[in-house]
Amino acid sequence: MKKTIIALSAILLASPVFAATTHATDDTAAAANANANEAKQKLHEEQNKGEELKLKQKHAAEGKSESFGSKVSEDSQKVWHKTKEGTEKGWDATKEGAEKGWNKTKEGASELEKKVTE
């Protein structure tokens, strides 16, 4: 019984340290996600530019660079790339918002635990 009380006391004393560590880790993870999203966005922009140039070269090689069909094809490719980028940004924002909400829930739970143990 005495060992159980000592172990429980040690856990309760250590819980604020774990909460602080978790909070710092959450902030670090959020910053890393933001940097990763920015890098991913730049990578996709460059990939899209490469695809657009490839399509223009293909049309030029076929002698269709000034045709109405090639212009429509190139413009539709640009629109598709912008749609994909917008979808990715929306998904990233949703994911980050969910993570922030989860982190706040964890913080609230640890604060409530502190109040209960005091």
Image: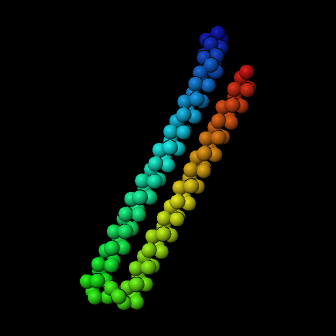
Q: Splitting the image into 4 quarters, where does residue 42 fall? A: bottom left
Which residue is located at x 49 percent, y 49 percent?
A: 34
The percent position of residue 90, horizontal first and vertical second, equals 56, 60
Q: Is residue 90 above or below residue 70?
A: above
Using the image, determine if residue 111 lies above or below residue 43.
above
- Quadrant of the snapshot with the C terminus: top right
Q: Position of residue 117 (x, y in %)?
A: 71, 23
- Residue at the spot x=47%, y=53% of the render? 37
Tell which of 42 and 116 is nearer to you: 42
- Quadrant showing the N terminus: top right
Would residue 62 appear left or right of 77 to someone viewing this image? left
Could you tell whether 77 is left or right of 22 in the image? left
The structure residue drawn at horizontal position 27% and vertical position 86%, both measured from the top left corner, is 62
Residue 76: x %, y % from top left: 45, 79
Task: Decide: is 82 above or below 41.
Answer: below
Asked if residue 117 lies left or right of residue 74, the reply is: right
User: Residue 8 versus residue 25: which sits nearer the camera?
Assistant: 25
Q: Can residue 4 be seen in this view?
A: no
Q: Which residue lies furthest to the left in this view?
A: 61
Is residue 41 in view from this perspective? yes
Which residue shows up at 59% across the image and 21% down it? Answer: 14
